[in-house]
Image: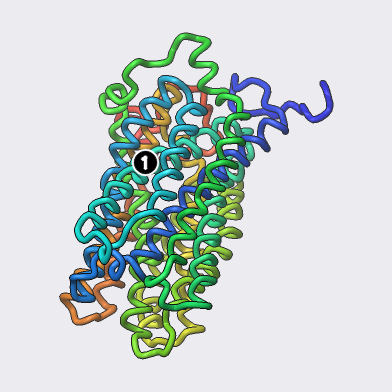
Amino acid sequence: MPAGTTSLSGSAGQGRITEADLRRAAWASSLGSALEYYDFALYSLASALIFSELFFTGADPATGRILAFATYFIGFAVRPIGGLFFGSLGDRIGRKQVLLLTVLLMGAASSLIGLLPTYGSVGLLAPILLVVLRVAQGLGAGAEQAGAATLMAEYAPRQRRGFFASLPFMGVQLGMVTAALVFFLLLIPSEDIVHGWLWRVPFLASGVLIAVALWMRLRLKESPSFSKLAAREQVRDKPLRTLLRTSRRPVLVGLGLRMAENGGSSIYQALAVSYVVTVALSEADSPGPIGAISLVFAAAVGAVTVPVAGRLTDRYGRVPVYRGFALLQLALAVPAWWIMSTGHVVATVAVLSVALGVGVWGMFGAQGALLPELFGAAHRYTGVSVAREFSAVVAGGVAPLVGAVLLSAFNDSWVPLAGYVILLTLITLATTFVTPETRGRDLDAETDAVAGEARFAEAVR
C-alpha cells in the first residue's frame, strides 16, 4: 500500500479509509462547523450587545432586547425547514454535495449582514432585511452540523468513532472563539461601535471562511456509507417519508437528548451574556467586553472538553458519558446564575467557562457519534437533521426569547432563569434512561439503533 494510504478499520463493510481521507474529512467538517458557529456566535453576541440599537432604535431598551432576540429565534425557527430539505437531499444525492451548498448559503448570508443599512438610515426596511438574511442563515445551518456529524461518523474507524465524530464540534469552539475575540477587539478601541462601521467587519470576514471551507470540501470524497448505498442501489427517493414511518423513536430520543445541550448552549451564550451586561454589570463603567471575554474563555475550555468527551464515549459508552455531563449542568444551574447575578467579573467569567465550556459542551462532544449511530444508513442525514433542528427550535432558539421575557416579568431576577436550565436538563436526564447504547454500531446497517418495541424495551432494561 502506498505511503499515506494506511487502511483504517471502520464499520463492517465500510471499505478502506485512508489516513489522508480521514484527516481531510476532519478538516472539511470542522471548517464548516467553525463557519456555522462563527456566524451564530456573531449573531448571538450582536443580539445581546448591539442589534437592539442598530435595528430597533425606536423601541425602549427592554423591548429592543426582546425584538433582537426574536430575530435570533427566527434563525432557529427556520432551521428545521433547512434540515428537512437539505437532510433529505443529503440522503439522496450524497453528503458532500449538500455540505457544499449549506456552507455557501450560511456564509453568504452572514457576509451580507455586514452590508445592511441600519434603522437610522432606512427605517423599518433595516430589520426586515435583517430577518431575511437571518432566515437564509438558518436554512443553511439547518443541515450543516447534521451533515458534518454524519459525514465524520461514517468516515471514522469504529473503535475511535466517538473521538473523530467530535472533531467537527471542536470547530464550533474555534468559530466561537474567533467571533468573541473579534467583538472584544472591536470594543477595546470603541465601545460605541454602533455609530461607526466597525460592527460590520466581523460579518464581512465570513467571506474568508467561506472560501477556505469550499476549497476543502471540493477536495473531499463522498462518505463511504453513502457510496455503498449508491453502489447497491439502496438510496431512497423519499428518505423523510421512510424516517417518519419507521424511525419516530430515535427522533424523539434525539430531541430529548438535545434539550439540555442546545437549550443550555443558547441560554449561556446569548441570554447570560445579555443578563451580565445589561443587568448584573449595568452600573459598571465598561461592561460591554465582559460578554465577549466570557465566551472566549468558555470556548477555549470547550475546545478541550469536546474531543475529551468524544474519547470518553469510546471508552465508557455514549450514554453514561452524556448523562454525566447532564448531571454536571444540573448541579451548576443555581450556583452559576447566582454568581453571575453578583456582578463579580472574574467569578462570572470562571463560572461561564465551566457551565458552558464543560457542562454544555461535554454533552455536545458526546453527541458527535451518538446521534448518527441512532439512525440507519439510508435516512441518517435526514434523521440527524430532524432531531437536531427541531430541538434547536424548542430548546435553543426559543431559550433567549423566553429568558428575556422572564427577566422582564420577574424584575430581572435570576431565579426563573436557573429554573429554566433545570427543567431542560431534567428532560435530557430522563431521556438518557431510554436511550440505547450505540458504541460500536455498524453504520452500514439500514436499521436504526432503536428498532421496534422489543429492542427499545431491552435498551431500557
Query: Where residue 367 appears, x then y in whole percent?
Result: 47, 47
Type of the residue with mark 1: Gly
Looking at this rendering, what residue extends furthest in the left direction?
409
Which quarter of the image is occupied by the N terminus? top right
415 lies above or below 271 = below
| Residue, disc 1 | 142
Q: Residue at x 44, y 53 (%)?
A: 39
Outermost residue, front direction? 121
Task: Give how far across and how far down residue 402 sits, in percent.
Answer: 22, 64
Residue 350 visible: no
Q: Residue 118, relative to residue 418: is it above or below?
A: above
Q: Nearer the viewer, residue 375 or 94?
A: 94
In the picture shown, does residue 142 fall above or below 360?
above
Q: Residue at x 19, y 58 (%)?
A: 124
Q: Nearer the viewer, residue 376 or 292?
A: 292
State whether residue 13 appears in this view: yes
Which residue is depicted at the point 46% across and 48% down?
36
- In the image: residue 122, left or right of residue 161: left
Which part of the image, by quadrant, shows the C terminus?
top left
* Quadrant of the rendered image containing residue 395: bottom left
x, y percentage for residue 142?
37, 41
Numbered-mark total:
1
